[in-house]
Amino acid sequence: MVLIHDKYFEIYLKSDEIQSEVKELAVKLNEKFEGKTPLIIVVLNGSFMFASDLVKQISFDHEISFVKLSSYNDFSSLGNVLELIGLNIDVENRDVIILEDIVDTGLTMNTMVEKLKVLKAKTIKICSLLFKENAFKGDHKPDFIGFTIPDFFVVGYGMDYNQKGRNLQEIYKLKN
Ligand code: IMP
Ligand code: MG
């Protein structure tokens, strides 16, 4: 059990379970993208550890870009919109693989896919380590999923609770 800020978390997925699932995801991606040169887009911050382990097992030719979605106020629409920052490689006519730590409501993936379509990506596939199926209300289910999990809050292996806990090797869930 670990204490992060004011909350206790208990182990949910052990390091070796995560590593073997990451390996299986790499095998699936290797089959799918053999002979192609996709652009891997890593959605920071939470995905950094997953991406780092996954790409070590990838055998196809590829390029990697690290992006963030940051919100800003758009005064023309008078709303809070998400801006994609850090994309330093041309997406037009590319096969794209989005790497995510966790797909929860799916709204982040809605935004990502929408933006990549505007940039004229040829194909877009989503690979997420975790998928909260019951919380999902988006339009783009991940194409490659490590673990489908219930709708509870997790931390570790890159994911945070108020910026803490990212370094944990295991994935923990909130203790109730
Ligand atoms: P979505 O837009 O609701 O699908 O959520 C996207 C982002 O919220 C993920 O990429 C995570 O960074 C974060 N997130 C969602 N659920 C959790 C969780 O249980 N723990 C930590 N971060 C989470
Ligand atoms: Mg994320």
Image (cartoon, helix red, strand yellow):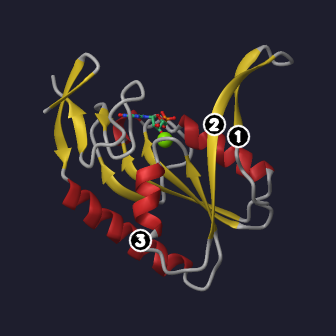
Q: CA distance from mark 1 to mark 3?
A: 26 Å
Q: Are marks 3 and 2 in contact (CB under 8 Å)?
A: no
Q: Residue 50 appears in which quarter of the rendering?
A: bottom left
Q: CA distance from mark 3 to mark 2?
A: 25 Å
Q: Earlier in the sequence, mark 1 or mark 2?
A: 2
Residue ranking furthest to the front: 167
> With respect to residue 88, does 55 lie above or below?
below
> With respect to residue 24, does 127 lie above or below?
above
**Mark number, residue 103:** none
Q: Residues within 10 Å of mark 2 (few under 14, many from 20)?
A: some
Instruction: Mark 1 and ligand 2: say if the CB distance to the nearest ligand atom is below 8 Å.
Output: no
Query: According to the image, label 1 marks what residue?
Result: 84
Residue 173: x and y in percent read 23, 34
Residue at the (73%, 45%) spot, across then down: 115
Residue 61: x and y in percent read 60, 79
Residue at the (74%, 52%) spot, across then down: 117
Camera-side residue of 110 and 60: 60
